[in-house]
Amino acid sequence: MPYCARVPPSALRDRKKDRTRRALLAAAVELFETRGYEQTTVADIAAAAEVGTRTFFNYFASKEELLFPEPDDRVRAAVAAIAVRRPDEQPVEVLLRALRAAGDNPGEHLVDDLGARIAGVRARVSRTVPSVSGRAAHAQLVAQREIARHLQLAYPSELDEVGAAALVGAVVGAVSGALTVLFQGPYAEDGERLHHHIHETTSKVLQPWLSRTAATPV
């Protein structure tokens, strides 16, 4: 009789939780895109995912939390980029590469385009819904602090805590300001073209920093 490995009950429970969480995310994004964020209720999302409202709250505390999944893989991508810095790289160079690593990770914690759809909805809703705008601002602040902490640890002799925070804030602020305008433009509803213009605009905004770094003797 062939041996069949049994899957531990804990692994089966984890798989079921992942499926339920994904079903809730997929249902929410579909409703946000077709019905609108403010017109969609928690009960609507639960019903579309074929679970009860109580189950929804086992996974997410609110609709806003759906748009800000934890952990944020974009921050982890930035931190990983800092960790593999080259000996000759300056702090600004490493930070720019880290931010690009985060920006080139639109899939977040999902393996297909659902993460990109969540990011698109989040960007649009953040401009019009105060509660989401506040959550987005808080999430960005937390991300900046984490990135600045790792940047300071990577360059302890060149950056103190305040200097690292200032550098990250300046660069992120420049990029965020440009993207805010971009999301209001004609490409906001076209995911592929929007991604292209985000990359193009980000590179343009960061060019002065890149030029300054290139002019700095090592």
Image: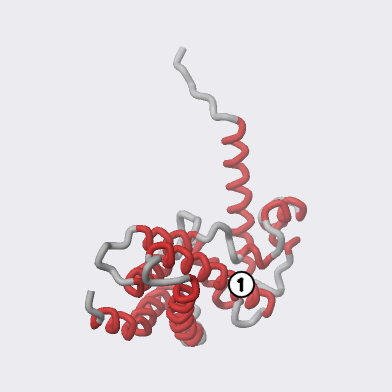
Q: Which residue is mark 1?
A: 138
Horizontal side of residue 104 vs 133, given as left or right: left
Residue at (37% x, 68% y) in the render: 157
Residue at (25% x, 67% y) in the render: 88
Viewer-nearest residue: 196 or 163: 163
Q: In the image, residue 98 lies at what x, y percent?
A: 38, 67
55 to 213, vertically: above or below: above
Residue 121 visible somewhere in the drawing: no
Q: Residue 62's image quarter?
A: bottom right
Q: How is the image coloured?
A: secondary structure
Q: In the image, residue 15 lies at what x, y percent?
A: 57, 41
Q: In the image, residue 139 lies at what x, y percent?
A: 58, 69
Q: What amino acid is labelled 1 in the image?
A: His
Name, please, the residue furthest toward the front.
Answer: 157
Give the mark count.
1
1 to 44, vertically: above or below: above
Name, please, the residue furthest toward the top.
Answer: 1
Q: Secondary structure at mark 1?
A: helix
Horizontal side of residue 85 vs 55, given as left or right: left
6 to 156, vertically: above or below: above
Name the quarter where the C terminus is drawn.
Answer: bottom left
Residue at (45% x, 16% y) in the render: 2
Viewer-nearest residue: 194 or 57: 57
Disc 1: CA contacts within 10 A as few (<14), some (14-19) or many (>=20)? few
Residue 144 visible somewhere in the drawing: yes
Q: In the image, residue 181 lies at what x, y percent?
A: 49, 87
Residue at (22% x, 78% y) in the render: 217
